[in-house]
Amino acid sequence: MIRIGMIGADSTHTESYTKLVNLPGAPLFGRAQVVKLWGEDRAQAQEKAALYQIPEVAASPAEAISGVDLVMICNRYGDDHTAPARLAIAAGLPTFVDKPFANDFAEVQALVALAAQKGTPLMSCSAVRYAVEVMALQPRLAEFGPLNLAVTSGPAAGDFPNPRARHPFFYGTHPVELLHTLLGPGAEAVSTQRSARCDVGVVDYADGRQGVINLLQKSPSLYHGVVYGEQGWAEIEIRNWEQFYVGTLERIIGMAETRNAPVPIEWAVEVIGILTALLRSAANGGQRVRLSEL
């Protein structure tokens, strides 16, 4: 059984993932167990540990990653991810970093470089990548012939009292991850038009495909995508919130079992690169920003 050390108790993702392995009858019960939890607020960590049968509340991140097989960095905000991720990667432990990977593209690149240096399996993604709606669409994409365009939409920011939820990476990661899942890698540049209501980013790909990302300032909680090919098209709306945690955690555990990440970590770098370029373009009046220039 894979022993998991979890960093961060302030996010609902802590319990969303933990209950899938720790509670009897859960979808992944018996395959792994969260055995340690650390959080900045110790009382909060203790409460979640009691609710979800986590045996130990660690006194520090270093203690939380000791004697485990897998580390999950699940702090709510991206600026809290880099330091514990660096600690886990340096220790050679398979590491999952929850969305957003980090709040700075240079920090993402540094973590990936460290993982390559240490030979540490590393994974980061939004759980929308493994939503049941997305997974059901994947086998059908070949039917559409060469893909021309995908359009994805989602909220630009989280509805939380903490101002850190306004950081554009916090929720902006989701529609970018969805676009990347539909079209795959190969983004070259982004141009963005900004208004008070939304940022609309156009992503250019090396082979002529294009993507459109809508980051909506005021919207219902939705993640929506449309993909168009030469011979067909499809539309998805992600609504099954519970199941995308199952799909993601299955692959996180698999990474620990095999020491192979389910997708290249460069894909996660490209997701953050697209988002960084989108925001930089918006801040510079729509100027086209190449990912190679970041």
Image (cartoon, rainbow, N blue to C red):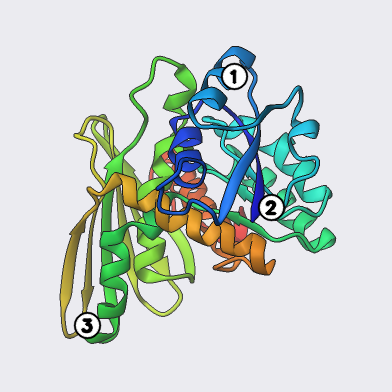
Residue 67 position within the rendered picture, expressed as x and y whole percent measured from the top left? 79, 44
> Left or right of 196: which side holds 15?
right
> Left or right of 234: which side holds 211?
right
| Front in this rendered view, residue 185 or 98 | 98
Q: Three-letter amino acid code at disc 2?
A: Gln
Q: Three-letter amino acid code at disc 3?
A: Phe
Q: CA distance from mark 2 to mark 1?
A: 33 Å
Residue 48 position within the rendered picture, expressed as x and y whole percent measured from the top left? 52, 24
Residue 172 position within the rendered picture, expressed as x and y whole percent measured from the top left? 40, 42
Helix, strand or loop at label 1? It is helix
From the image, tell me which residue sits under label 1.
46
Seen at 59% across and 12% down, the residue is 43
Would you identify the image quadrant in which residue 141 lies? bottom left
For residue 109, the mark is 2
Does residue 228 lie above or below 93 as drawn? below
Helix, strand or loop at label 3? It is helix
Q: CA distance from mark 3 to mark 1?
A: 50 Å
Q: Three-letter amino acid code at disc 1?
A: Gln
Helix, strand or loop at label 2? It is helix
Going from N to C along the chain, the mark reached first, 2 or 3, is 2
For residue 144, the mark is 3
